[in-house]
Image: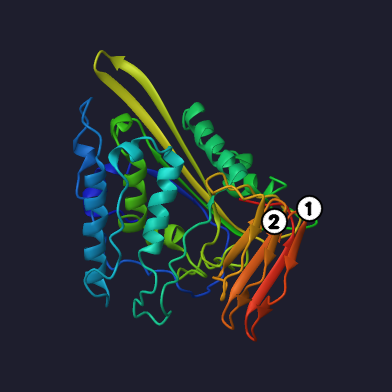
Amino acid sequence: MNYPPDMTQMRSTLYICLLLISFNHLFGQTPPSLNSFIQYPIDLSSQTSYGFSKITIQEIQAAFTQAHRAEENQFCLGVNSIVDWQMPSQVEWDATPRNEKVLFLINQERMARAGLDYCDGQGPVKGLPFIGIEEKLNIIAQDFAQDFIDNSFQGFTPLDTLNQLVDNEPDIGCLNPPLAICCNEFRDALFINFPSEDFPLHERELEAYIIYLMIYTFHENIREIVLLQDNGNVSYIGEGYANNYGSSEDEGFLGIGTAFDSTTTGANSYNYGYSFVLTYIDPVPEAQGCDYNCITCLPCPNILAENQNPIPNNTYQAQTWVQSAGEVSSSGDVIMKANDYIQLNQNFQVNLGGVFHAFIDRCSN
């Protein structure tokens, strides 16, 4: 793996394990590899004294903003064409769980490039965010990260591989047999470990730092893992999202694991080890006997009436029923889902060319 010049001191201590599953060369609307690395503006490796203040939201914002301008300069992109999304307040950010921080940063970076054409012949980037964090996928990622810390970084066994753990989970996996149905069409995983001597990690916004590194300073294949859209640009990643589950405005579930190790070696000296796991799946279409649970999504209402004309492209779901007297446009893509029934009232219409799906299934976040 090639590291940027100012990361040579980390070569012996930064370990990255890519668990990739596809070798098909399918091109799609994923932002291409950078022509050169874009360095993080703060050298964290030189700031190792205990008690150094944590990175603020202003510093996180500034880091990604300067990276946007540098990326635009490497391609045929106009200045400010990559959207400079805004961080929440410091109070809100400090109260946000680590996995939700990762979800926020990844989704903002994915959406920031929506509609941009990098002049590589692949067309504009869709810029779709992830649906959210899936409960079972997140448990797998978190357990994997913690297991790596608890076992003193002793390496993997065959049962440790993230993709295998995902496929062993009946509600989201893909073993056939014993499962009659594969519950994902595509999944991938990434594992990163910062050994304890690198940084005083308890004082850092490591999630923001790692997402930055994956998009702007690590190998091109890691950038694609974070920004992957329909299909990949790198040959051995290949697959991507079919975007046939839930809303047409988002795709894929994430699972995120973070774990720390700390030992006191002196009155003001601490050693920290940090493991970061990111794994994701592209779920199969609705009503296929699988069971996804998005723990970061808004809960479904008990009942729902959708009567707009036209009905905006989205998934409309409720615990009991969904009713509609609206109209699906000729370019529409609308899904309705409820546990008891879906009632299409007088004046409901699907125009020629429009797509409408109705599923009797329990409400999934």
Q: Residues within 10 Å of mark 2 (few under 14, many from 20)?
A: many
Q: Nearer the viewer, residue 150 or 60?
A: 60
Please give the name of the residue rendered at 69% of the width and 45% of the height, measured from the top-left corner.
Answer: 169
Q: Which amino acid, mark 2? A: Cys
Residue 144 at what x, y percent from top left? 54, 37
Q: Are marks 2 and 1 in contact (CB under 8 Å)?
A: yes
Residue at the disc numbered 1: 179
Which of discs 2 and 1 lies nearer the camera? The answer is 2
Where disc 1 sits, the SS reads loop
Residue 207 at what x, y percent from top left? 37, 43
Q: How far is disc 2 from disc 1 in space, using C-alphas?
A: 9 Å
Location of residue 332 (image quadrant):
bottom right
Q: Is residue 67 visible?
A: yes
Asked if 76 appears above or below 114 in the picture, the reply is below
Location of residue 327 (image quadrant):
bottom right
Q: Nearer the viewer, residue 328 or 201?
A: 328
Location of residue 343 (image quadrant):
bottom right
Q: Nearer the viewer, residue 331 or 197?
A: 331
In the image, taking residue 102 as reference, residue 56 lies left or right, namely left
Residue at the disc numbered 2: 183
Where disc 2 sits, the SS reads loop
